[in-house]
Amino acid sequence: MTNAKKKTTKKRWVAGVTTDSTHPPPGLFTKDATAIASALASKKVSPKGPGSGMRMLTYFINRGGRGLSARRRDELEKAKVLLSKRIQRERKSAGHETV
């Protein structure tokens, strides 16, 4: 018997999720960070606002898992930062400043 590692396949929670609540345009997540953040903040893509877009972006990153290249993951993380700043600006302008 050899000491070879067994390959185990774990089911990931993101693989079983199906939803039709948001409609990002095809290829959105292959664009640059600014375009991604801008699109996800729009009411057309995220009717409930940029917070919904942030959840969608986080979900996409989780679903991509190890399959995302380092370059693509970095660009998506930049989009998260940009989107987060936009959410903070909107909260601040609406009078919902957090400490």
Image: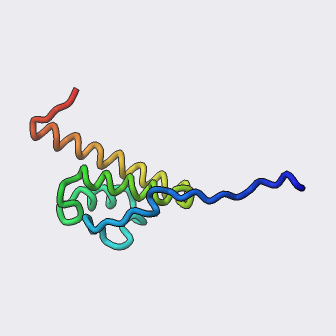
Please determine whether, in this image, residue 26 is positioned above or below residue 4: below
Q: Nearer the viewer, residue 58 or 78?
A: 58
Instruction: Give residue 29's position: percent from left, percent from top.
Output: 39, 64
- Tell me what residue is drawn at x 41 percent, y 59 percent: 60
Relative to 6, 77 lies left or right:
left
Q: Quadrant of residue 10?
A: bottom right
Task: Count numbered badges in the picture.
Answer: 0
Q: Nearer the viewer, residue 74 or 7?
A: 7
Please determine whether, in this image, residue 85 is positioned above or below residue 39: above
- Tell me what residue is drawn at x 36 percent, y 49 percent: 80
Instruction: Give residue 78's position: percent from left, percent from top.
Output: 40, 49
- Tell me what residue is drawn at x 16 percent, y 40 percent: 91
Instruction: Give residue 45's position: percent from left, percent from top.
Output: 23, 64
Relative to 37, 94 lies left or right:
left
Relative to 51, 10 lies left or right:
right
Instruction: Give residue 50's position: percent from left, percent from top.
Output: 23, 52
Q: Quadrant of residue 76?
A: bottom left
Q: Residue furthest top?
A: 99
Q: Residue furthest right?
A: 1
